[in-house]
Amino acid sequence: MQQSALSFHHPVAFWLGCALVTAGVFSHAPMFLMGQHTHWQMVGMPMTTEMWVGMAIIPIGLALSAYGMLPRSIPALHGGLASPLNFHVADGVPLNRAHWTLVAVLVVTLAIDVMKPATLGFVMPGMSAEYGIQKSRASLLALVALTGTTVGSVVWGRIADRFGRRSAILLSALMFIGTAICGAMPSFGWNLAMCFLMGASAGGLLPITFTLMAETVPAVHRGWLLVALGGLGTSGGYLLAAGAAALLEPMFSWRVLWLLGLPTGALIIVLNRFIPESPRFLSSMGKHAQARALLAKFAGRRDHVEPDDEAHPGSPVIDERHPVTGVRQLMHGRHASISWSLLVAGTAWGLVNFGFLLWLPTNLSELGIDPAATSALLARSAIYALPGIALVIWLYYRWSSFKSLVLFLGLTAGSLLVFGALDMLSIRSVVMTTLATAALLVSVSGVIAMLIPYAAEIFPLRLRGTGSGVIAASSKFGGIVGAGLGVAGFFDHFALSAILLALPMAAAAILLNRSGVETRGRGLEDIQYNFRDSKAI
């Protein structure tokens, strides 16, 4: 009996593994419930036998689930892909119910993914108070989480390219469930360890969702849907984190925000029936019948799945004398220039988002803003910035994919230079500061809304997950550097930090303007045709 794109190779092993992971989390419940007698303060409590057993069976459950879902044979592990895709969906077909269902499920998945690191800001005050540690030491939690997301983006991207997009998403969700035990840890050290694993799972899920979407929806709708997915998922994740903190933290302390990894991760597992494997990945595994059936579902009608022949010419044949087979070739071969430009863009974005913006409330006082009014100013600026997401989607869809990204990189650099000028010229204006803040929030949000979707479009099939993961990791790496610069006092020099951070943003815009490839409305295989004349180094 042939498997479908929604089935598992060993379903009993997969669901048994899920049960073991869940049981491992529930084994920590008695310790957590004991905290109700101490106002949910668990610091210093001894680890029970049940907790140690639970921690042991969680990795066993993850291994079982991985065995249950991963393919029996991996052609990509033995020299590359199977025979190429010899059929395609007409890229102009309208969106149907299958597409919208996938979009809805991936928005939920991405919101849950964003929610995990977003809870850090709500967790740290209560954690610092309970463990009796200084803010400088508590900030290690954010640093460890960012390191985890950096590592996870690369590792899970490789998993997606080797074992499938769907498998990587579900394994990441299981890690969400397993790391929920962080909410019952009696020591700060255990929280750091679990936070690293949480970051690793969260960092990997982001690029994979974009990769699966890019390989499933018709080309004419792909660009704007990818950007909308990023905008809605990110906004939804922050809203979920803020809502959970407001509703649950007063009742159960900061620990409940970690424990939410159980129900949120379980929700992704429950929705697995609506998360198909990528038809392109299935074809690369030699599963052409499954890929054709899945394409027919997303095409709406079987006659929209066309064979590549004289009557229905498919994607152009790409010269593979210099095939992209590994990360080294990705960074040194025909995709090198665009890979490096996106890496610079991701790193620059991380420096601004996790560095300059993090210290902006403190530095606004230097521009004549009363500390009490800072929060109100940032709130107003964020409201003014909301229409910017719609503008990003419109530009990416109607104008140009890479030129839109170049534009917002340039706007970010320009906004930073305005802040530098305001400080250097001692201009104290609430109106100008509000406009500069709104412009920076719009441009920074626009960059990240387009960066990973664009990466998911321009890399080849066998390294699409890896390439997207590496670019996502660069944004987190920039965050790590930004956090370190903050500790070193770099952002105390407001004008200098603004001007210096504008330089890599401007450099990224220049590099991408030179090497960018247009993806708007083009098939994924057609996009690779632009790289055919480049020579591997």
Image: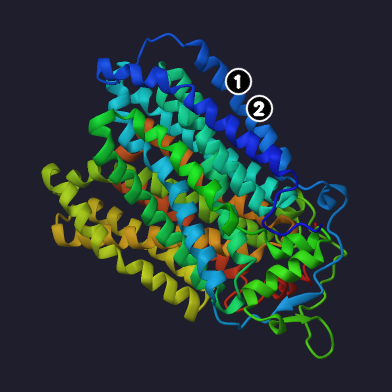
Name the one closer to the observer, 249 or 495: 249
* Vertical placement of residue 68 versus 400, above or below: above
Residue at 55% x, 48% y: name it: 205
* Vertical placement of residue 169 versus 338, above or below: above
> Which x, y percent locates residue 28?
46, 22
Residue at 45% x, 26% y: name it: 182
Residue at 77% x, 53% y: name it: 329
Q: Which residue is mark 2?
A: 60
**Mark 1 residue element:** helix
Residue at 73% x, 38% y: name it: 67
- Residue most extreme to the bottom: 311
> Which x, y percent locates residue 119?
36, 39
- Mark 1 is surrounded, within 10 Å at the Cα level, by few (under 14), some (14 to 19) or many (20 or more) other residues, namely some
Give the quadrant of the C terminus.
bottom right
Q: Is residue 341 visible?
A: no
Amino acid type assigned to the residue bearing label 1 in the image: Ala
Contact, CB < 8 Å: mark 1 with mark 2?
yes
Amino acid type assigned to the residue bearing label 2 in the image: Ile
Q: Which residue is mark 1?
A: 56
| Residue 168 disc label | none
Name the one closer to the observer, 52 or 533: 52
Q: Is residue 242 visible?
A: yes
> Which x, y percent locates residue 391?
38, 73
